[in-house]
Amino acid sequence: MRKSILLIIVLTGLAVLAACAAGMRQPKTQADLGEYKFVILHEAGDLGSELGSTFSGLGFDIRQASAPEDKAQTLVLSLQHITASGKTRAKVRLYELASGREIYVGQASTEGEAYPESVLKAARAALLGFYEQYKAPSPDMGLLVAEKVVGSIKPAPLEDSAPAVTVSSDADKDAQGLERMTRNEQELKKYFEERGKDLAEVEGIWANQKLGYSLAIFLDKQEGKREFAGMYLKGGDKNFKTGDVVLDIAAMAGQAYPALFRGPSGSEFKGSFSLKSGELVGMFKDSEGKELKMAFVREYPASAQPTKPKPSLGSTVGSGFLLSNMGLIATNHHVIRNAVDVSVSFPALGKRFEAEILMKDERNDLAILRLRGAEEFLGKLGPLPYHLARPNEVKLGQDIVTMGFPLGSELGESHKITTGVVSSLNGVRGEPGRMQISNSIQPGNSGGPVFNHKGQVVGVVVGALDDEYYLQKKGFVPQNVNFAVKIGYLHSMVDLIPDAGQCKLRPAKVHAPANLEQLVQDYSPYVVMIRSKTLPKG
């Protein structure tokens, strides 16, 4: 009898523990989500605004920087996206600001690598589970708002010397409700001439030879709406009149210009323009999936930016480290941003190889490179002495070592190390993808590994607070406030690489270093210097 009672008590206890564990793994229930009022977005610019529109439509108050006083009612949205092999993968995480407790995690993939369109598409798909469990006054509102076409994150500033092309008042519209401008062909040609070498490639007078009409496309910045306007100029299309604005065109994103075309009777088509063999080709769809294709040839000027000189290449020096014997190198995205040529040096081994960009995560500033022509070299390497730590193995106050090539151009190709501790498990304003480190770092350290004394990589050096900004805006210079990307975000990228599991496991015959000297001696051969030839910004 006693044994039976004891067995029942044990089974009941196990059932309660299992239920508690399951509850910890699940997101909060639909009813519980109603207690949250605010959502803070870590993503700024148009991409953050688009996701913000989604949550505004669901009834939340959106903040992009400052936290409301009642942190208990505040969720934080963190977005990670990775582009590789023609696809974009997005991972979204919603967590409480006050406790850091995870409320929702979702991820999804989409075809294409265009930023921000592919990222937004994948992010919205990753958030579908949240929409399903959250009751809002109009659950579809956010999804509809988030579908509109967006422009670039940081549009180029308009030069003061450039003549402005202004929009008439809102009341000045045609019978179809289209925006109307009062620019004639002579004024536009003068404007294009004065813009000269600053003229964007999409600007000019373009003719659709098949339908026999012309459009003028010119710079007309309207925040959150467009970068360029497309105005009907002349021709035989009875649906439009001279001056009708039929196109809102965003700044270039990837290789295309996102655009919205307004057709007859208030119809709208979303798509993009791209330049192909001198033609301006647009591909669009309406809300019902009806496709529309249009192609234009340039009438004026003969070519955009005729006197613009060929840009000279810049250079970037950073650090990185070997991820596996497959020839994979981890570094920061900003080390290889706009790179046209990347080389990787192993100073301790006297080797240098060209590399290609295999994978990049712009949001979290990570990239993975692959060495070219290094098969023989990699075949002679033994197992790597280190491996990637699990996210829960990174602790506040943990002793750490950074290794890399600070001020590489000035201090040369010799490894430099600094010691310190993990001083915070979050970045600026609680950003979840960063951790703060006390190690001294300099330009050139970017992309280098952060080791703990167990011989694990716990992060990737990413940068420091901007001294000049804080001096001008706050009146002081921050002392030794540096950051690294958390190792979990590198795990997310490695998970997408076939047969890359060795990055996470220490081989049985390799032991953790006995002391700092041994760590430096054993690990430095695999910490690399990365040099990139880059196109100028913008």
Image (tube, rainbow, N blue to C red):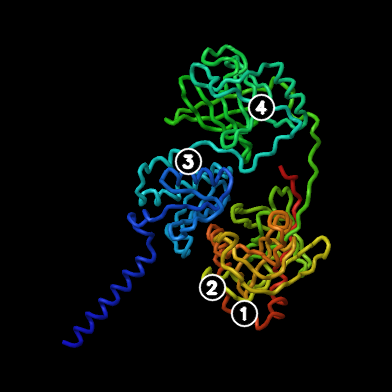
Circle 3 — which element?
A: loop
Q: Residues within 10 Å of mark 2 (few under 14, many from 20)?
A: few
Q: CA distance from mark 2 to mark 1?
A: 15 Å
Residue shown at 75%/62% (left/top)? 345
Dot 4 amino acid type: Phe
Query: Residue 250: horizontal and vertical position, in percent?
Result: 60, 34
Which of disc 2 and disc 4 is earlier in sequence? 4
Which residue does the numbered mark 3 point to in the structure image?
Answer: 146
Which of disc 3 and disc 2 is earlier in sequence? 3
Dot 1 amino acid type: Ala
Q: CA distance from mark 2 to mark 3?
A: 38 Å
Query: Residue 209: horizontal and vertical position, in percent?
Result: 62, 17
Dot 3 amino acid type: Ala
* Above-or-below relation of 95 to 216: below
Which residue does the numbered mark 2 point to in the structure image?
Answer: 393
Query: Residue 144: horizontal and vertical position, in percent?
Result: 43, 38
